[in-house]
Every structure is written in C-alpha cells, then in structure tokens.
Amino acid sequence: MSGPEGAQEVRAGAPDPLHDRLTSYAGRPAATAGTGKDPVNAPMIRHWCEAMGDTSPAYQGPDAVAPPTMLQAWTMGGLTGHPHGTGRSAAYDELLGLLDGAGYTAVVATDCEQEYLRPLRPGDLITFDAVIESVSRRKTTKLGTGYFVTTRMDVRADGEPAGTHRFRILKYRPGRRPTQRKAPLRPRPVINRDNAGFWAGVAEHRLLIQRCSDCATLRFPWLPGCNACAGQEWDTVEASGEGTVFSHVVMHHPSFLAFDPSGEGGPYAVALIELAEDVRIVGNVVGVPYDKVRVGLPVRLEFLRTDPDLELPVFRAGEGG
Ligand code: ZN
C-alpha cells in the first residue's frame, strides 16, 4: 500500500485542539476479544497460494504452515464485516465519529506492517485484540488535509502470541477539485524497502531481476524472500531487454488520459511481457496501436519518460509486429 510519504505537517506547533482530543484515544481498544471466523485451514491457505503464485512446499502437505502474510486474513470479518474484523470497539467508532464531525469524512488505508511471532497451522484458533496506537498531527497530503490513525492488532493462535498487524488509515477532508485541471500524470510508483533497488535500476535504464543467492531462482516482481527455497539473500541480474507478449488486456473503460499514448483517454493495451530470462513483467507496449498487440509479439525494453519526474520501463513492438 502507499505510504504516508510526502505528507506535510500543518504548522508544527500550532494549536490543534482536535488533535488533543484525538490523541486522548491512544491506548484505548479498537477491537476487543475478536475471534477468527474460521480456524486456520488448508483450503484458505491453498487459495491464497494459488492467487499469489506461491508454490513453496512449506505451505503444502501434512506439515503445512500458513504463509505468514496471511495473518490479517484470519481476522477478517468477511463480506459483511469490518476490515478490522469482528468486535470493533465503541472507542474506535467515537474516534472516527469525531473526525467525521470535524469534516474529515473521507478515509483511505495507507500502509500496514506485520510482525510474526509463531507459525500458524491448520486447526489453530485465532483470537485478537486491537488497540488505537497513535493519531498523527494534522497533515496535508495530495488527497487533502487529515490525520493518520494507527491501530495495532495483536493476534493469538490457540491463546499464544502469533503476530502483530499494524494498520494505518488517513481520515481526511477531501480537497476541492481545481477548476483548471492540469494534464493528468501517470500515478507514481510506490517505492518501499522491498523494491527500491528495482527503481534505482530503472533510474539507470537497467531492468533488474532479483536472483536468490541460495538457489539462483530469478524472481519478479521484487519480493523480500525466495518463493522456491525461502532464502532471504539475493543479488540481481540485468534483463537483456528481449521479450514477448505473454498476455494482454485492452482497457476501454474508464477512460484515463494519462495512460493513453494519444492523450485522448482512448483504449490502451496493458501487456504481461515474458522476458528472455523467463520472468514476467506488466507494462505498456509502444510502437503499435492497442488493437495490434497480440500474444507472442516480440518486444524490446526501452525506458519512457512519461513526465519530468517519472520514467517507466515499456516494451517496443519488434519489426513486423
Ligand atoms: Zn531460493
């Protein structure tokens, strides 16, 4: 998820009575005595691994554990529940109500952090409590001015501490739309500690693929660990730049000016490119109209400056495409 980078404090030190009221909620429960809808179970683990393309043997067979990143999944309330799961507290509702009442009516999830204390196995019964950890000072972001609210959920498995899930939202007052709209820009990539090396490569016009130091498996997109052997050490190899279109879709709706090379908000193709190194990357195909993109089309990497602050890897259709 996108982080709160770029948020600016509004006149640090200026009186902010609302902030004082909001911070009085720090330390109060956000959810109490929550219980997982289902125990940790093999079908959910299997669906998750299929969706993520994670083939690690650790998540299969009689001794399977759950992928640690599923931590939150076991606490979720389902389609009719709240993302914080069951048992949301009156204090948390009050806190959000205060923000709504002051005009900070919009909400966006900004980031989450997890810590894993013990593996989860099928049959584990999940219980959890969540606490309102902190409320930021008032900040101005591109979305509008508001407050970041951080909650921390402590998850237990059969009563033992299993992990923590720290979740941050921005409650904000939506900014007014400018009357004169500038030409829209491509959305900025979210750069974090797990993918910073990839974007550093792009800045040097190199498309870097991660390689596991233990088993040499190549991986893309960038991840903190190896899906094949769970190794955490890695280096990189530079893609040769040769590839073919493995799959593609054409976006017709909604129209989005920034993505259409003609700038008219018309259809555009999004392709999944299979690189010569046998990993795949999502990108735009350039040099050919959207309706001429086809599976198997040979393409070659190049870097496109979409605006003064952004360069992206794109793929130019080969001769006779
Ligand atoms: Zn490996």
Image: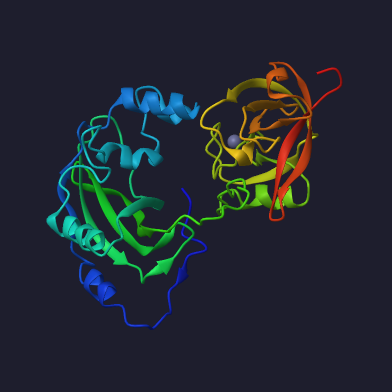
Res 119 visible: no
Quarter that holds the C terminus? top right
Please state the horizontal and vertical placement of residue 228, each as a whole percent of the image.
Answer: 56, 31
Residue positioned 72% across, 40% down in the render:
313
Residue 167 appears left or right of 179: left
Please state the horizontal and vertical placement of residue 59, each as a whole percent of the image.
Answer: 41, 29
- Residue 145's place in the image compared with 109, above or below, is below
Image-quarter location of ligand 1: top right
Q: Quadrant of residue 104?
A: bottom left
Q: In which quarter of the image is residue 169?
A: bottom left
Q: In which quarter of the image is residue 312?
A: top right
Label count reads: 0
Q: Coloured how?
A: rainbow
Res 299 visible: yes
Please state the horizontal and vertical placement of residue 210, each as a whole percent of the image.
Answer: 66, 41
Please tell me which residue lies in front, 281 or 119: 281
Residue 261 appears left or right of 190: right
Residue positioned 54% across, 42% down in the render:
225
Residue 242 appears left or right of 284: right
Residue positioned 47% across, 30% down in the render:
52
Please state the horizontal and vertical placement of residue 22, each as a whole percent of the image.
Answer: 24, 69
Residue 174 appears left or right of 214: left
Please tell me which residue lies in front, 110 or 143: 143
Residue that protrudes farthest toward the front in the picture: 179
Residue positioned 24% across, 67% down in the render:
26
Residue that protrudes farthest toward the right in the picture: 319
